[in-house]
Image (cartoon, rainbow, N blue to C red):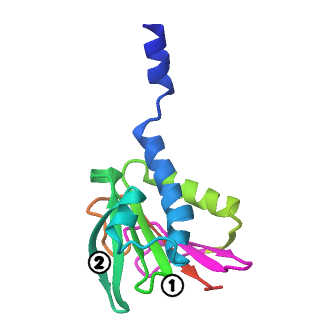
Amino acid sequence: MLITLAAFALAASPADDQRAEVERAVFDLCPRTMVGQLSLADAAQAQAAGYTTVAPRQTPGGANPRAIRGEGTGRIVISSGSSGRTGCSVWFGGPQNRRLADMVKSQARAHGYQAAGESRLGDGTRLYVFRLAGEMPATLILFDADAGGELDFRPATTVVIMAGAN
């Protein structure tokens, strides 16, 4: 009985699983799509990463491949640029939204991004900008909103990473 209780206490919670998956989506999967190592348009590659392909996101710049993982407020959406190399976006949220957004900001610094400012859009939405220098410069922007309407719940956060946008 005590062993069962101890195992239960040590088991990862759904919130911990979502945190780990958001971190993986932003700092592993997005960079892999941007350098052509992962194609979200390829159902087998998306599935191997734990995601399911869905209809491309239609933007003025073209159709952007996207994939989802999870359900309800635990859902995570990832979308790559139409060329697969120009950028990547991740949407997440739900009850753990603030904790997840704070984790992304903290992990951005741990991955070498430097905070470059905080501002607000015309509608009051906060955004945080981080820049990465080096061989593969990039800009990471975290929006305190469901930018683009990918999720059907709030609160939500959108992270956009753009290659070479320093």
Dividing the picture into quarters, in which one does residue 145 lie? bottom left
| Residue 74 as seen in the image, left or right of residue 108 | left
Query: What residue is drawn where x is 48% and y is 61%?
Result: 25
Q: Among all residues in the image, which is located at the extreme right?
A: 134
Q: Is residue 161 visible?
A: no
The segment highlighted magenta reads 118-146
Query: What residue is drawn where x is 47% and y is 21%?
Result: 7
Look at label 2 and name its amino acid: Pro
Structural distance between the alpha carbons of marks 2 and 1: 16 Å
Above or below — where is 20 with respect to 11? below
Query: What residue is drawn where x is 47% and y is 70%?
Result: 38
Q: Which mark is residue 86?
A: 1
How many numbered circles does the render carry?
Answer: 2
Q: Among all residues in the image, which is located at the extreme front?
A: 44
Q: Residues within 10 Å of mark 2 (few under 14, many from 20)?
A: some
Where residue 116 appears, x then y in whole percent? Answer: 67, 75
